[in-house]
Amino acid sequence: MRRTLLESLIHGSVTEAAPAPDEAALAELAGSVTRAARARLGRSLSIRQVDAGSCNGCELEIHALNNAFYDLERFGLHFVASPRHADVLLVTGPVTNNMREALLRTYNATPDPKWVVAVGACAVDGGIFAGSYAVAGGVKDVIPVDLHIRGCPPTPVQLLKGLLALLV
Amino acid sequence: MALLDGIPTRSKVAKHRPWPRFTVEDDGWRSAIDRLVDGRATLFGLWGDTSAVHMALIDNSGREIAVLTYETQDGSFPSVGQRHPPAIRPERAIASLFGLTPIDAPDVRPWLDFGVWDRRHPLGKRTPGKRTTKSEPYSFLPAEGEGLHQIPVGPVHAGTIEPGHFRFTANGEHVVRLEQRLGYTHKGVEWLMRGATLEKAARLACRTSGDSAVAYGIAFAQAVEAALGMTAPPRALYLRALMAELERLAHHLGDIGAICNDASFAMMHAQCGILRERTLRVADACFGHRLMMDMIAPGGVTRDLAGGDIQVLKDFLAEIRGAFPRLVELYDKTASIQDRTVTAGVVKSALARQFGAGGYVGRAAGRAFDCRKTPGYAPYDALSFEMPVLEAGDVDARIWIRIREVEQSLSLIEQIVARMPAGALSAPVKAKAGEGLGVAEAFRGDVLIWVRLDDDGLIERCHLRDASWFQWPLLEAAIEGNIVADFPLCNKSFNCSYSGHDL
């Protein structure tokens, strides 16, 4: 037995490298996840907006989504007061170091499945504020991001286009 | 100048325009504090430098402004806040950002610095070292009495608004004390300004408070132009004023509706929202950007009106003039909304004066100050408009000031369009050293920007002071004795900037 053990040690493992996942299986799983997401999130999404340090320009245009011209609620999209009621976190700003923890806590308070949408040029990579001692970076540097809506600030139409993509 | 009569100054600083800057010793600094305390001058700004503290004063007529500089010998300066409360927060910010100590300050808790940056005193003299010690937990001011409880709110709020923390101490429904903790949106704007080109600095100034992008653009351009001893051409000044009035209109219209919405009067909100959107679309049509960001540069403006824009503006004026009076009547004749706004969130006149509260917060409480009037700047000196002032100081008065200012802005736009001068959009900007102060009236109040340029025309130091610095503390006072449920209403009627304050 000693000899067998010794040989095994010297010759190393016979375990082979993992094969790539089966494409068909992946596609099937992706399909079922999509169906589950559609079933749970449907064509109606609750949005919790979080300002993680913006200049407030993005907030002005997000506000505009509720006016009679854009009427966000006709698409089944509406803003909610608590992250616990939300399917989508709409995050603006470079994430300041002073807001980092609050953003993380808000993210953790949002139930799965959830989407994070980063809004504005600063939310991509810190924008004009990148490199400051007070700025942690873009939203993706703190929490996982599913979609970026660019612009400084993005117009309500650009915001709508991005949000509607979540419903398709 | 009368403003400084009797204040011992040491020397006048060369190349500081358009108002003078003097260095002072202990006696001069203390005598300036006396003047603030006895109400003969108003604190217009208080900011740090690598080894100095600057104090801007404005006289009560609003015509004279001066900057006093106290050079710190051992990193400390006599506290202004000890005797004049409006200076407390600016002083705490100076201590946190520059590491300069106000001697005998009444409140030594940090401000803006939550202990999570990788350094202390980021704008201070010495190259800041790594932060090694963990910061102490922040302690809120106490309130004592039977049956009191605390309600912590924020930084993440229920609505789409900026982050900040409000600590209420309440007795049942009534607020006994509100204390704000701000700084969540601190981005290090003044640190980013250092060494920036004028082009980058103007973009940063615009984004100090996005809702006042035009006003910041104007104040920054004025400061740089003053430092360089130049002026922008007349057409640029008129275009700036046009943008400023469109910005004011958009936000006043939005605010009137949003305040009513916080008292559940949704119809005003919906109707005002339509007029606000029309305004932003006209801004977009004329200047290619709904918030008109980056349209103003030192020396002039970056964009001209196109051929059809004058007609677009005229049609817009006619539309708003047709629709707005009906909304004013709706507000005026609905008793249920008045029941919420009248006598809610009262700011006392004496407090508004002491804090030098600008904008609708000050003007609704008897402080007649609008920096388009005094000290005044072009082209407003050539335009005719009124400054509405009320005494009540409540939510209702802050709505009425906005209503009257919407009417004034419509009249101003009409005059600007009628008199728009032809000519160049900008004057050449030559890089050289200098110091300048710019003051512009944003929709919420006066914005002060101070710059020092180096020999290459780059920013050496830039300070940006939002009107909110002297309005936020008044909200703490105004809410006292009101019910917690009225806080959103009162807060919205102030509509202070978080980002403009936090920088």
Image (spheres, coloured by chain):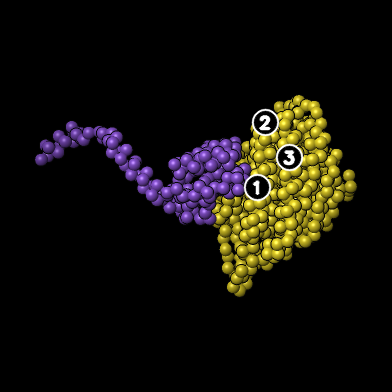
Chain colours: A purple, B yellow
Determine the residue located farthest toward the left in the rendered image.
A1
How many labels sit on residues?
Answer: 3
Characterize the local packing of mark 3: few (<14), some (14-19) or many (20 or more) Cα atoms within 10 angstroms.
Answer: few
Q: Is residue B177 left or right of residue A104?
A: right
Residue bearing the label numbered 2: B199
Instruction: Identify the element where label 1 is drawn.
Output: helix
* Residue type pointed to by label 1: Ile
**Cα distance in 3D space between marks 1 and 2:** 34 Å
Chain letter belonging to callout 2: B
Q: Residue at x 80, y 57 (%)?
A: B390
Identity, as a three-letter code, of the amino acid under mark 2? Glu
C-alpha distance separating marks 3 and 2: 34 Å
- B243, above or below A50, in the image: above
Q: Position of residue B148 (x, y in %)?
A: 60, 70
From the image, tell me which residue sits under label 1. Answer: B274
Q: Is residue B472 shown to the viewer in this render?
A: no
- Of residues B497 and B419, the one nearer the viewer is B419
Q: Are marks 3 and 2 on the same chain?
A: yes
Q: Are marks 1 and 3 on the same chain?
A: yes
Q: Are marks 1 and 2 on the same chain?
A: yes
Work out whether B469 lies above or below B415.
below
Query: Which mark identifies residue B307?
Result: none
Residue at 88% across, 49% down: B6
Q: CA distance from mark 1 to mark 3?
A: 15 Å
Q: Secondary structure at mark 2?
A: helix
Badge 2: few (under 14), some or many (20 or more) residues near its Cα, within 10 Å? few
Location of mark 3 (residue): B315
Identify the subunit bearing mark 3: B
